[in-house]
Image (cartoon, grey):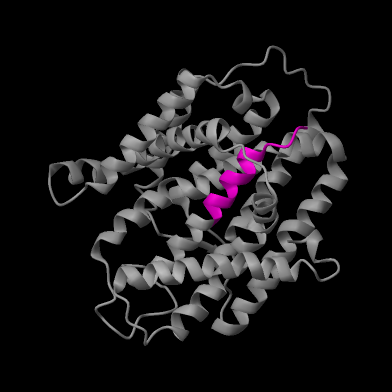
Amino acid sequence: MTRKYYLDNLKVMLTALVIFHHSGLAYGDGGGWAYTPSNPNEFMPWIWHFFSTNAAFFMGLFFMISGYFVPQSYDRQGFTQFISKKAVRLLVPFAIITAFLSFVTGSPESGHTWFLSSLFLFCLIYALIRLACKNHNYGKTPQLNLVWIAVFAIAMGIGSYIIRQFYPQDKWVFFSVFKFEPAHYLQYIMMFAIGVLAGRFNWFERMTNRTGLTALAIGVLLCIGNYVRGNGAWSGFVWRWFGIYESFLCVTLCIGLVWLFRQIGNWDGKFWHWCSQQAYGAYIVHLFLILIFQNLLDAVWVGAFGKFMLISILSTVASFVLTWLLRMIPGVKKVL
């Protein structure tokens, strides 16, 4: 399988966005974030737009990119090796972070590594399906087009709308250290499935410019629509139908971003190759570094936005560098 540098580069950008997102939680309505600024002026009321838009798509995009590489990985390795490698790669850091967080908080807590346990579950289900369908003939391979994108978005939107009648956004379900958010979980399942289909049928490479550009334009317009929400009729409409609105934003923007990076982000160089190698580990370690920098710089005043940007940049750089240092330890590369 030819290396898809544009997916590597997109994943690097996406990891940085996650770090910026978590860095900003302390300076907005971040819910149960572990740090609160001592200066009440370090608050940005507008940043909820940033949180809402990010949450609408960025974890779904992570699942889609992860799913893209699963079919070829299974083809090369087979069931046993595929699952064993996924267990090391996903469950080992999940167990380590969960043990640490549970010790610190005094209660079962997996933090942001819920993504790892869910991704392993999805990979396991895929592997079991492949094991049961060894001789399946895929027949004529379909091409990703606007009709398929609309079908995915509609199905996700209707399902998400129904789920949110019982489990609103930010309500989590816990099974000891394993947790998930029902409001977004259908999105994650479907985006992983889209990634698997894209990997099997080479959708991303075969996607036409018309399909990619249209999807990107719709996704960007829906992002703008979410950013301009205030307290008027438009905001009420979006809030009423947000499960559907968010699903269309997620599917179109994620596919559009893949197309955009395929067109202009397929660069390869030592720096970007280095970044792509550290991106996974940066996701795992970034939360702790954010909290360290926020506490160390609590007394520094550079304005609320300045503090947000300072913490975000420092945490991003430090997360990638720390991962690079950790990967020098023998055996760590198998996990990070």
The residue closer to the viewer here, 76 or 297, is 297
Residue at 36% across, 49% down:
53
In this figure, what is the number of numbered marks? 0
Q: Position of residue 256 (x, y in %)?
A: 47, 32
- In this rendering, position of residue 227 left or right of residue 279: left
Q: Position of residue 273 (x, y in %)?
A: 69, 50
Position of the N terminus by quadrant? top right
Q: What residue is drawn where x is 35% and y is 81%?
A: 37
320, 222: nearer the viewer = 320
- Magenta span covers which residues? 1-15
The C terminus: image quadrant: bottom right
Note whether 190 is above or below 211 in the view shown. below
Residue 205: % across, % down: 63, 25
* Residue 97 seen in this snapshot: yes
Residue at image x 65%, y 55%? 275
The x, y position of residue 289, in whole percent, is 55, 75
Q: Is residue 264 magenta?
A: no
107 w.r.t. 199: above or below? below
- Write down the quadrant of residue 71 in the picture: top right
In the rendered image, the vertical position of residue 300 relative to residue 30, given as above or below: below
The residue under the point 73% across, 70% down is: 325
Q: Quadrant of residue 316?
A: bottom right
Look at the picture and state if 194 lies above or below 62.
above
267 horizontally vs 83: left or right: left
Report the side of 151 relative to 196 (left or right): left
Is most of the magenta stretch helix, strand or loop? helix
Can residue 176 be seen here? The reply is: no
- Outermost residue to the left: 232
Left or right: where does residue 281 sit relative to residue 155?
Answer: right
Give the image quarter of residue 225.
Answer: top left
